[in-house]
Image: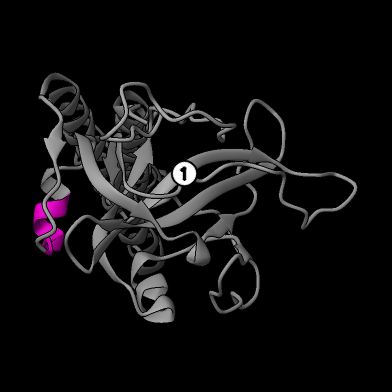
Amino acid sequence: MRIRFHFRWIPFVVMLLLVALGVSLAQWQQRRGDEKLARAARLEAGNLAAPLALSPAPMLPANAQAIEYRRVTVTGHFVPAWTVYLDNRPYKGQAGFHVLTPFRIDGSPMHVLVAQGWLPRNNAERTRIPDYTTPAGTVTISGIARLNAGHVMELGTAPPLAPHAIVQNADIAQLAQASGLALQPFIIEQTVEPVDPTATVPASGQLPVRDWPAPDLGADKHRGYAFQWYALALMAFLFFVFTGFRRANKQP
């Protein structure tokens, strides 16, 4: 008995499109998983390494990537005149803001953005910022280096950055251009009390909450998604082959 195959162009093209889509999306998910694994490795290395004392020298973006998740310390003073508030940053189910303030590195014109912490939002008056304290004078702060302050979905055109603006997102380059300040290509998520280098005890005062969310390190879910997309591509191919043989062998 001769086995025959009935070839048709339209199913063939549809099969090719589905296979290409499935393989492409599977490879994308694999890359996402690899990125999460690399991020987890950087996070572990950053936790094990000794804190890095930041110098005032401008840092290249490639070097900034190398210190992401590294514990860092820096001495200088805050520039509260250019504080901005990142909206839609919930904390334990409560709406609020992240406080983002430039910090001038001691002995230089270079600045670094410091995420001071989280503040609750006033439900009755949405744009009202609760009272908090930004230390004045020269202090040494510690924190975790991050490449950006995170990003949330934003509808419409973003308003221009301005001092004390409430915005959805704040890009480092945009803030540098709006403020005229020289900014390092990373931010610091402040984790401990600022320390006055001339004092024997940490500075006091009410400060924002500094319980930062852990980065997403779920590489396994991306591997699962990749398997599903590969399976879709294989099913599309097998279905094309099966139906081609079935149609051919049904014909007299």
Q: Is mark 1 on a helix, strand or loop?
A: loop
Image coords of residue 37 (percent x, y): 20, 30
Q: Can residue 144 be seen in this snapshot?
A: yes
Hey, which residue is sitting farthest right in the picture? 124
Label 1 environment density (alpha carbons within 10 Å; few <14, some 14–19, many ≥20): many
Instruction: Say if 186 sits above or below 41 in the image.
Output: below
Residue in front for this viewpoint, 208 or 216: 208
Nearer the observer, 22 or 207: 207
Left or right position of 169 against 185: right
Viewed as shown, does residue 65 lie left or right of 180? left
Report which residue position mark 1 lands on: 135
Which x, y percent locates residue 205? 56, 31
Residue 43 in magenta stretch: no
Left or right: 136 with respect to 91?
left
What is the three-letter code of the residue carrying label 1?
Answer: Pro
Does 59 lie within the magenta span? Answer: yes
Residue 79 placement: quadrant: bottom left
Residue 48 lies left or right of residue 105; in this view the side is: left
Where is residue 95, by image quadrant? Answer: top right
Does residue 224 lie above or below 157 as drawn? Answer: above
Residue at figure coordinates x 60%, y 65% from the top left: 164
| Horizontal and vertical percent position of residue 117 | 51, 39
Magenta extent:
58-64
